[in-house]
Amino acid sequence: MTASIDDDRIDLLTRGSVEITDVTKRYGTMVAVDRLNLTVRAGEFLSLLGPSGCGKTTTLRMLAGFEQPDEGFIRISGEYVQGVPPYKRDVNTVFQAYALFPHMTVAENVAYGLRQKQVPKSEISSRVAEALDMVKMTKLADRKPRQMSGGQQQRVAVARALVNRPSVLLLDEPLGALDRKLREEMQIELKLLQSQLGITFVFVTHDQEEAMGMSDRIAIMLDGHIEQLADPETVYERPASAFVAGFIGRNNFWRGTSTGSGVRANDGTVFVSSTPEERVAAGDPALAAVRPESISLSSTDLGRDHNQVEGSVASVSHFGDVLQYVVRTAERDIVALLPRQGAPRLAPGDQVWCHWSDADVYQFSADQADLVLVEPSADSAG
């Protein structure tokens, strides 16, 4: 009896878990995924986030079984899946294009996978009804895809994937074809659905806001490897590299030399940092970074010898409850984001001082300078 209980407990802990160990995938001489290691916890919503060509979709396709790794191993729910075809894996995939059959009704689309598995008709009916209820599409069961909106088609694609009761649901940029408002609504619905079902979601996206809003953890990828794996707050507040700091949210970057306790930028700006995890050895090339929302503006010199720079307002843009100022200094443009309530009312041409606290300064090595040093231009701001 004890052995049976232990076996059940182990199954509950491992069903839906994903382990990727030293996985490499090549296409000719191009390395798409480079010795990737990643563990996804059972019941977790994990996003693979990164720019085009970073390896996130290739990773998802290897989990689905559409591609096989050249090196390394993948385990899903504790089972090795090398050589296992997609239809024999305990996963299902939702694609950006939805891939619905145009000649079938909603209910027929959802039932298709069950029929292929020769599930009894009585069970098919109940499971299709359950899946459609999950995504609030019961009333449209008899419609064809062409009679539905993009958001409705997306719900059907999710229902078709969930009806097979997979341990892992793979989602390849499923919201990319939707307009902004509908995409935001579907983000909320997908996250709620995942929380209710407890199914592991592995979600591929290039949209940082999407990943930040939906994920338990985010794996930020670059050149086939993971730059950082952490929860959204940690990724934002403590980026592991200059690339992550520039890709998640926005940052103003300065190139310079580490002083040990900060960075002396090439334009003479002195940065003092109280974030020791980003320390760079004194004398080494370094980058300093400050997020736009961490910058304050004043019309007078604060009399400080660090963490401030003088400039003039180049442009002002209005984004709802936020004002964006682009401040032109002698060497570069700086972006500052201030809440509309309480923000100084400044106009182009006004002289200002930008200043920020020690806690808001990030230090990085200069290795990724070419990836992040795209300075904003006042001519294109807003």
Image (cartoon, rainbow, N blue to C red):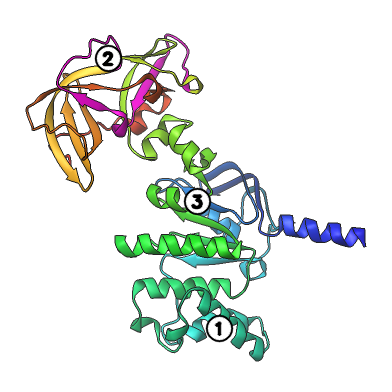
- Pick the quarter of the image with the C terminus: top left
Q: Secondary structure at mark 2?
A: loop
Residues packed near mark 1 inside 10 Å, few (<14), some (14 to 19) or many (20 plus): some
The amino acid type, in three-letter code, at marker 1 is Ala
User: Is 381 colored magenta in this rendering?
Assistant: no
**Residue 255 in the image: x percent, y percent?**
32, 20
Q: Residues within 10 Å of mark 3 (few under 14, many from 20)?
A: many
Q: Nearer the viewer, residue 226 or 210?
A: 210
Towards the viewer: 323 or 75: 323
Question: Mark 3 belongs to which amino acid?
Answer: Ser
Q: Which residues are magenta?
A: 278-307
Residue at coordinates 42% horizontally, 65% vertically from top-left? 96
Residue occupied by mark 1: 129
Give the number of callouts.
3
Q: Nearer the viewer, residue 178 or 118?
A: 178
Which is in the foreground here, disc 1 or disc 2?
Answer: 1
Q: Which tag, 3 or 1, sits closer to the chain's start?
A: 1
| Residue 154 place in picture, x, y as percent | 42, 71
Left or right of 12? Residue 353 is left
Q: Look at mark 3 in the image and give the residue it sits on.
A: 215
Kindly tell me whether residue 66 is visible in this rendering. Answer: no
Which residue carries the number 2 mark? 269
Q: Secondary structure at mark 1?
A: helix
Q: Secondary structure at mark 3?
A: loop
Relative to 133, residue 166 above or below? above
**For residue 63, what is the image quadrant?**
bottom right
- Disc 1 to disc 2, C-alpha distance: 64 Å
Mark toward the start of the polypeptide (3 vs 2): 3
CA distance separating discs 3 and 2: 37 Å
55, above or below 115, in the image: above
Lateral position of residue 31 relative to residue 339, left or right: right
* Amino acid on which the number 2 mark rests in the picture: Thr
